[in-house]
Image: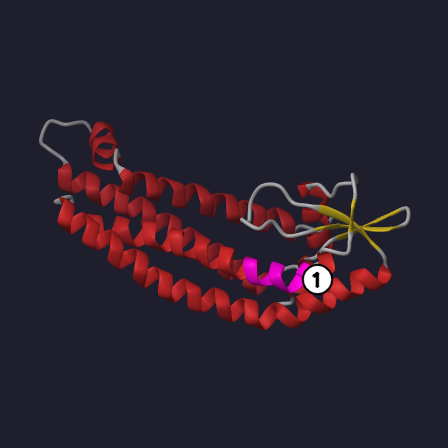
Amino acid sequence: MIDFVKFVVFKPVSGGYVYRAPSRWLFGFREHFLVNDAQKAAILATINKSGQLVLWITGIALILQSALFGTALSLWAHRSGYYTAGLSGVITVIATVLSVYSAFVISRQFLLHRLHPILTGLSPTNDRITNLEERHFIQATSAPLSPARLRIAIIAGVVTMTASLGAMIVRAIDSYEPGQSEWPALWLANANLSGLLNIATIVAFGFAIASLVRNSKPA
């Protein structure tokens, strides 16, 4: 089971700790509170008890909403006359992204509901925990990936990047015409949403691999 407690950051300050509450919508403004040792323990205990339910809520919401969004988008494409053979993959990606975000928002609402009795009794503070401070704290308290797991993660990332690039090349080959240069063919075949999603996948996994390698190096 995931240990959610290790992702909770408390910054020591004069008079106690600064606690950065979760954002209701995953991104954007997050409230900061000044807490003492008893309040810190209560927050950690609530998050620890809620962890299993958060995972179940996220998983169930993801499955149900994937079916809902996928069906709704497919019906809309068919009825609007936009449906083509290649659109099914795009619909799957869009439905997955929407489902993942919505599932995490729903589980975040549940967690904040559990924390609400504690948060209402806390005092807001002007002290802040920056994203960089939070990231450094989590990295310092998290066990690094073992060499074997790091290799597996890198291989999986490289395979995904290669598959995405291969899909772009295959589309270019299918649309290639005699006398046409290779680069314009590659551009024209991928100047669409599918090509953009492939490029985003390559960039995202490249960044993830670079981050894994950088974080695995000893300080």
Point 34% across, 43% down: residue: 197
Q: Locate residue 77, reporting x and y percent.
A: 19, 48
In this rendering, the count of numbered labels is: 1
Q: Can the viewer see residue 113 in this picture?
A: yes
Please determine whether, in this image, residue 188 is positioned above or below residue 41: above
Residue that label 1 marks:
117
Q: Locate residue 206, reporting x and y percent.
A: 47, 44
Q: Locate residue 181, reporting x and y percent.
A: 19, 27
Say if the magenta span includes residue 114.
yes
Per the rendered image, the range of residues in magenta is 109-117
Please determine whether, in this image, residue 184 is positioned above or below residue 147: above
Point 50% across, 71% down: residue: 56
Q: Secondary structure at mark 1?
A: helix
Point 25% across, 36% down: residue: 192
Left or right of 131 on screen, residue 108: left
Residue most extreme to the left: 178
Please determine whether, in this image, residue 140 is positioned above or below residue 49: above
Q: Locate residue 190, reporting x and y percent.
A: 25, 37
Q: In the rendered image, which quarter is residue 44 located in?
A: bottom right
Q: Can the viewer see residue 1 in this picture?
A: no
Does the magenta stretch mainly form a helix, a strand or a loop?
helix
